[in-house]
Image (spheres, coloured by chain):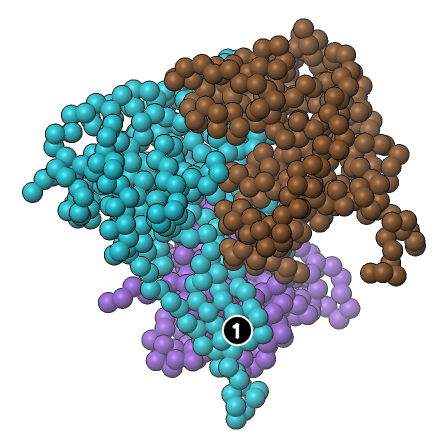
Amino acid sequence: MPVKNPYLPELVTIQKIIDETPNIKSYQVVFNDLEKMKNFSFQPGQVGQLSVFGVGESTFVINSSPTRMDYLQFSVMKAGEVTAAIHDLYVGDQIGLRAPLGNWFPYEVMKDKKILFIGGGIGLAPLRTLILFMLDNRANYKNITIIYGARTPPDLCYKDDLKEWESRSDVELVLTVDNEYPGWEKRIGFVPTVLNEVAPSPDDTVAITCGPPIMIKFVLQNLAKLKFRDEDVITTLERRMKCGIGLCGRCNIGSKYVCKDGPVFSLAQLKELPEE
Amino acid sequence: MSLEKLKETVAKVFHEVDVVIGYKQGFDPLHATPCFITMPEQVDQLIWNPLCVQNLTSYLPFLKKKVGIVVKGCDSRTIIQYMQEGLIKRDNIVIVGLPCTGIISVKKVLHEIDNQPVESITFRDGSNVVVKTVKGQKILSLSDVCPDKCSTCQYPTPLIYDHLIGEPIKSDKPPESVYEDIREFEKKPLKERLEYWEKEFDRCIRCYACRNACPMCICQDSCIAETRDPHWMSQKLSITEKFMFHMIHAVHLAGRCVECGECERVCPMGIPVNKLKKKINLEMKELFGYEPGVNLEDKPPMYTFNVEERKIEEHKL
Amino acid sequence: MAQVGYLPKEKEKAFFETLSKNALVYVPCLEGDTVIFRPFSPERTLCFERSANIPPKTIIFPQSETLFSFDYKKNADDPQKTAIKLETNQEYPDVIIFGARPCDAKGFKIFDRVFMDTDTPDTYYKDRREKTVIVTISCESPSAGCFCTAVGGGPADKEGSDAIITELEKGYFIEPVTEKGKAIIKEPFIEDGSPYQKEAVERQKAANDMLKNPFSTDLTKISPSLFNSDEFWEQVVSKCISCGACTYLCPTCYCFNITDEQAVNKGERIRSWDACMFFHYTLEASGHNPRPTKFQRFKNRVGHKFVYYPEKYNGVIACCGCGRCIRYCPVSVDISEIVGYLRGSGIEPLKGPSKDGANAG
């Protein structure tokens, strides 16, 4: 059997585009090759490299759940060359996809535990795939709490999902925005501060967090103060990536590659890596 | 002895600044290497002889501290050019000037000794180089193994300094000799010149050693050779892309290149990139009467705009 | 059938010409003062006296190569729709690299672990590698900066070679190492090498004895306190100018970049060499850069070669001791000296080594 060329993307077509926030859009894609779509599987937390041919490739987490495989969803924040090019695309356009890449959330060891999600801004994207996965396997997990915040109410992602989760009785959703905003009646405060206010117990709980680097820094500090163990705190990292398969060398932190050994890392694993 | 005087002066200067940059012995007897002195004990490591080839001034625009620096004549031109362009503040540097009678070109010495590892090297009477290798001893004349810039050096004494080690030296080389090699090369037919450059640049690996070693090249971290926005050059290794990079680099240095020769010295593939910049400097001299890095009061021609340029007949263009 | 071969010097050119009929033969050629690997042709000047300026890694891992080309084709009936066609071309010729050095060959082994021993092998590298025969020439004497014996190599080390040659007075002694190497000694013009074996072994030993080990001890692990000290790196790396010469000339460096180039509706995705010493290497679109200073980048480079790679691959150091990074560095940064400090050589980096230099060949 010939060895698969790991750099060659599969072609996918954009089926739907959702405007999440002023600078974030979500894209639902399906493989042109329907057989491929049928046989595709991935784990929550894994990523894909989207190609705009002529511009380049970028890494995004597959934020739809493997339990809902009508399409694959990626959320793209406009930041650089490739993301700007993606934002210029329409429904029906074709792009390239190399997936699934990277490791995934260790949901097996989270069974029968309480789950605490802490997200900020677009950091909700990798958490979303796991939240949906867990909601579709609800019986396997105990309490699910989601603390999520953004700068302003328009910057909150997945507003439809948030509405649905708020209405569910088996999920506790805590929303916050950084500052006062006209029309916002709910909490105000930075996510790490709200975490302290909610003060969840570390017993039998796994905390999963993702967001801007500065938010993660304070969240991790506060989780430590709340006595969460390092093995029970999980986060996802981001680095500039190119090959996505651990060859080109650039996304390394010490001897680990964020594209291959990550992007999901536990705090215990992170503490063994050099500071970067 | 000038080395003793240099160490004495640096030991004094050390107290006025945060760091002093000089030369010390490198990994083998043939190489010197820059030395960043932050402790008084390190002053004793300093050396001063024809091995001191690097242009230490290229560190200046990036250091946000008070710096003491050791310069040769050619290096001092860089400092003057920096000051003309506002890239460094005169108050932040203390210049120790070294009048220089020439340095070696490591590549030329290695050529003379068949690339054998050097066991020892001594400099006699300011004009002879005695090199000892496994295969024996060879006496070379400094004028044979110095880089081209030394054979036509117009400024052996630094043009700007706070302390001068030794007596000033006057140049004994005729000014016309500086661009003689360019004028000779230009006599060749166009086709021959193109073939020459295509052959030379075929070896180029775009390592950017020439760019980073150039003291006047200060936008290294956002160089057009690598940016995507705007996307000037591809990463494809074709002769077109290589020409693009080198031509653009040479043009960016128009009226700024002080001909320190670092670009050619550092090229690991032995490409004479200095020639391109010298050619443009010759044009700048003839068009604007300007020589980079010589007079503090001069204004670099590419920094000024005259409605009527004296030597450009615009109607004829 | 002879187990070892011998090529008389007067038959050298004829031998290469015959080999060139069936394969692309790369030999080190002299251009001015530069030694560079070029396809053999009778007009070129061969040079086996010293290692090439740039290692032969460029033959199996080209500096730029097209991964695939893409073509946007508009649908004639419905111009709103475009189809995209992707095409690869992975046809490679048979290649013989003649005259690599043992350090260069060791570099290929470093590549192999990363590019082939993985569940996502790089098919471009793999296909080329499988079609390449590497014949190395053992070193007669070290060049300035060489330290192969300190990292587990040697002037006649066989790792990574298919066959190894030792230059004797009137010819070359050839020892096959792999099956591909055995095929080489069956080529025309190769005689039985057994009468020359003793002389070859003596020469190899003499070369080995000439190498000094710059590390006073290679049993001590790298000192973590020094490795993690910002001051240490600032002291030893201040003079670095952050170019890419060391990484591009290194036989074991394999970092690359992937960029797209487009002209109207067609284009290609290109893989090209990159260097961890460049600022933009880890620069993210947001503007954040985890390694913004050259000290951090240099620490990562030394760390990758001497700590991270050995961690992943059973203690194998990703450095072959060829010394090119030292010889061609514009400011003579000496990686062997820096690793010497980290390994507890007893020399304090701030005070510096003794005046006559550490590694005079």
User: In x, y percent, where is residue A269?
Assistant: 43, 45
Report how many numbered discs are placed on residues in the image. 1
Residue neighbourhood size for the residue with mark 1, other residues' Cα within 10 Å, grouped as few (<14), some (14–19), many (≥20): some
| Quadrant of the rendered image containing residue B69 | top right
User: In x, y percent, where is residue B66?
Assistant: 75, 26
Instruction: Pick whichever, B98 or C189, lies toward us.
Output: C189
Residue at figure coordinates x 59%, y 80% from the top left: A90
Q: Secondary structure at mark 1?
A: strand
In the rendered image, the vertical position of residue B15 relative to residue C273, given as above or below? above
Instruction: Pick whichever, C166 or B148, lies toward us.
Output: B148
Residue A135 visible to an observer of this rendering: no
| Quadrant of the rendered image containing residue A40 | bottom left
Residue at figure coordinates x 31%, y 46% from the top left: C97
Identify by letter the chain in brown.
B
The residue that label 1 is drawn on is: C266
Instruction: Pick whichever, C353 or C264, lies toward us.
Output: C264
Identify by letter the chain in purple.
A
In the rendered image, the vertical position of residue C354 relative to residue B84, given as above or below? above
Q: Residue furthest bottom?
A: C77
Instruction: Pick whichever, C120 or C57, lies toward us.
Output: C57
Name the side, left or right, on which A130 lies relative to A222: left
Residue at figure coordinates x 15%, y 47% from the top left: C186
Q: Residue furthest left?
A: C1
* Quarter containing the N terminus of chain C: top left
Chain on which label 1 sits: C
Q: Amino acid at mark 1?
A: Lys
User: In x, y percent, where is residue C208?
Assistant: 29, 23
Identify by letter the chain in cyan.
C
Name the side, left or right, on which C71 lies relative to C311: right
User: In x, y percent, where is residue A138?
Assistant: 41, 69
